[in-house]
Image: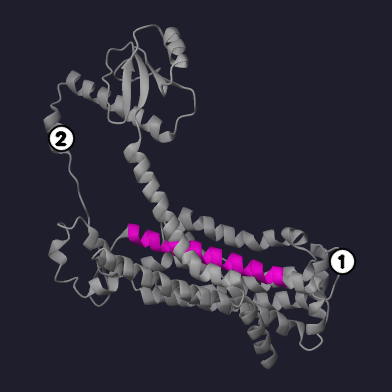
Amino acid sequence: MNKIWLIVQREFLNRVQKKSFLVATILLPLIFPALMAVLVYVAVEQKKNAKKEVILYIDESSYFKPDTAKFLFSPFTGSLEEGKKAFEASENFGLLYIPTFELAAPQGIKLFTKINPSPNDISDLEKVIANQVRDLKMIELHVDPEVLNKLKTVVNIESVKLSEGGQEKSSDSKVLFGVGMAGGILMYMFIFIYGAQIMQGIIEEKMSKVVEVIVSSVRPFQLMMGKIVGLASVGLLQFLIWIVLISTLSTVVLGFFGLQSPSQDMMQMNEQAQQVAAQGGTLALLNTLSQIPWTYVIVCFIFYFIGGYLLYGALFAAVGSAVDSPAEAQQFMFPITIPMLISYFGLFTFILEDPHGTISVWLSVIPLTSPIAMMGRIGFGVPDWQLALSMILLAGGFVLTTWFAARIYRVGILMHGTKVSYKVLAKWFLQKG
């Protein structure tokens, strides 16, 4: 155990003292919000100062009425062929051709452009024409527009979670969706990045012959465990620093704009409940955020990060010990990353859409997919027995993958110049130590 601890210290200090660690840990939480702010500002200014595009239009139906909300429409009285020539000679955005059509089934409408238009442009034009056709249909059917407007009703359902003790908590599926998506994506990124670092570090030490000196003093299994735990502690430290920085920056920014952080606002939530509508839903959002058990979410994230990282870290360590270069490792990384990809795509396909569905539950229980899947579900509330079962199986999965990886690691770490295949890995695994 002392030897493993020494290796953990070596790996931890070696990574933490690098400039790249300081840059990634301190600057990234500052750079990303700054970049997002700049991009949003540029997008807003661009939209504000953007000039409306001009569209020539030929209307053979006599139904079309120009709507200048987004585009400037200029009529053309000639034929379609003449209109094409005029459009080619101009700098206009497009040529809209509207033939004679039946109101029941508008057909044959075309937009000619010199560049491929964006989906938003096409959608905006379709809405303009669809609204005008609808109005014409209402006139034809003698439907009063005022009556139709009165029939439109907006219904807002407030979601309230009722616990077994009768305690009510406000919930918002969109907010929970965001929490689950962020947790799942962060988990995927952390496990993949730090797992790849283990593999890269082992390959570098193996190629530099340093590992041959180290294994003369420690057992290969101790070396593997020390590297895995050492890098896990680096990742955990980095995550905790990010949490502190983001929380501090959020408080400072909110204070700058005269707002309160969710933790401060939670104390005044009952008194201000009557002001939700007046504040345009901002207070409701803060209320929902304040009632999410952030401590519970963060603790679960730390557990699943450590468990998922240790599980996949052992497999990445086995791959790194078996090959002599990162290029050779690609063929063995794919089977390892398949469960991660399944859980990542399942996060958007099943988990966030139906967090309590059968597939979502199974993905959050199976050890190879549970770190990402469970973080996608955690904000929606997970039954205690499912969470306990998932954690137990993840711990057991780590023990199993560590045992599996150690049998390959103990042989592969000292092998050089061997053409490695799955058959060779199986031979190393079955070899008696």
181, 71: nearer the viewer:
71
Q: Which residue is mark 2?
A: 149
Residue 310 lies, in percent from the top left, at 61, 75
Q: Magenta segment, which residues?
A: 174-201
Q: Is residue 357 left or right of residue 16?
A: left
**Label 2 environment density (alpha carbons within 10 Å; few <14, some 14–19, many ≥20):** few
Look at 30% across and 27% down and name the residue there: 128
Quarter of the image where one finds residue 72: top left
Q: Is residue 50 left or right of residue 132?
A: right
- Toward the right, the furthest residue is 417
Q: Is residue 89 left or right of residue 295?
A: right
Q: Are marks 1 and 2 in contact (CB under 8 Å)?
A: no
In three-dimensional space, the C-alpha distance between marks 1 and 2, rounded to whole angstroms, equals 76 Å
Q: Which residue is mark 1?
A: 418
Quarter of the image that includes the N terminus: bottom right
Q: Is residue 287 above or below residue 66?
A: below
The amino acid marked with disc number 2 is Asn
Q: Main secondary structure of the magenta part?
A: helix
353, 177: nearer the viewer:
177
The amino acid marked with disc number 1 is Thr
Question: Which mark sits nearer the N-terminus, 1 or 2?
Answer: 2
Which type of secondary structure does the marked residue at label 2 adopt? helix
Please state which of the two labelled residues, at mark 1 or mark 2, is closer to the viewer: 1
How many numbered marks appear? Answer: 2
Quarter of the image where one finds residue 277: bottom left
Q: Is residue 362 visible?
A: no
Quarter of the image that includes the C terminus: bottom right
Quick check: is 194 in the magenta stretch? yes
Residue 393 lies, in percent from the top left, at 55, 76
Look at 68% across and 85% down and name the residue there: 7
Q: Is residue 160 above or below residue 393?
A: above
